[in-house]
Amino acid sequence: MLIAVVAVVLCLFATRITGGTPSVFGYYIFRVSSESMEPTLSVGDLILVRKSPADDIKINDIITYKSEEAQTYGKEVTHRVVEEPEIKDNQYYYQTKGDAPKSSLDRLITYDQVRGKYIHKLVVLGKIYGFLSTPVGVVVMIGGILLLFGYELVALMMSNKKIDDADEALFASVEEKLNKIEKDISEEKTVSENDKEDIKAESTAQKEDNQE
């Protein structure tokens, strides 16, 4: 279980470095980067977000969307829907606002800006991700990766040694069987030659008896 969690965290790091957003089957993982949703969500929290239909987003839902406001343009913002959605010209509009007391209303956003609806806070993943983001965590992560590669290398070498030992044992067994077969053939050949000599001797003796 721990290995799976660490693997997910490493995937998060890799995806973030490449500028993407981790996603699996329509679910996305985002990291809260501001205090606008305190106390519901804190800076550093990892949240699970799911892409939802426009009519499935209601008042009090928390959504993540791509901002078009000047201060946060192009960034993902996670805020709460504070009014019933409006529909104009077949387009859904949402009024959002952060949970923090001093937060103000955001500009109306369209469904096209919405990345998804908040599902759950990933507490364990968030703590591990936060730790691995620190200098000590980076050292631990690198050390763990090196240790894992070292273990796999040693295991591979031991496996190759076992294969070599098994091959040597097999070759020795085959060689032993071949030597035994060769010995049996040699003994049969010797017996056959002895039989020929006996037959020849009996024939000679019989001729001598006949001459007498």
Image: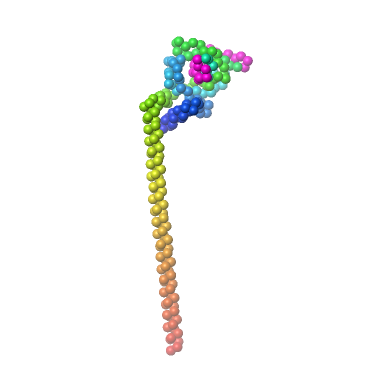
Please name the residue shown 38% across and 44% down the image: 158
Left or right: residue 142 compared with residue 118: left
Residue 154 location, x and y as percent? 38, 41
Number of marks drawn:
0
Please name the residue shown 41% across and 52% down the image: 167
Left or right: residue 167 compared with residue 112: left
Please name the residue shown 39% across and 47% down the image: 161
**Can residue 78 be seen?**
yes
Query: How is the rendered protein coloured?
Result: rainbow
Residue 185 is covered by the magenta coloring: no
Look at the picture and state if 140 lies above or below 198.
above
**Can residue 58 be seen?**
no
Residue range of the region highlighted in magenta in the rendering: 71-90
Residue 87 is covered by the magenta coloring: yes
> What is the quadrant of residue 41 in the picture?
top left
Pick whichever, 173 or 22, lies toward us.
22
Residue 197 location, x and y as percent? 42, 77
Q: Quadrant of the C terminus?
A: bottom left
Residue 25 location, x and y as percent? 52, 28
> What is the quadrant of residue 136 in the picture?
top left
- Work out which residue is located at the far right of the displayed protein and give it: 89
Please name the residue shown 55% across and 15% down the image: 109
Q: Quadrant of the N terminus?
A: top left
Residue 104 location, x and y as percent? 49, 10
Pick whichever, 70 or 158, lies toward us.
70
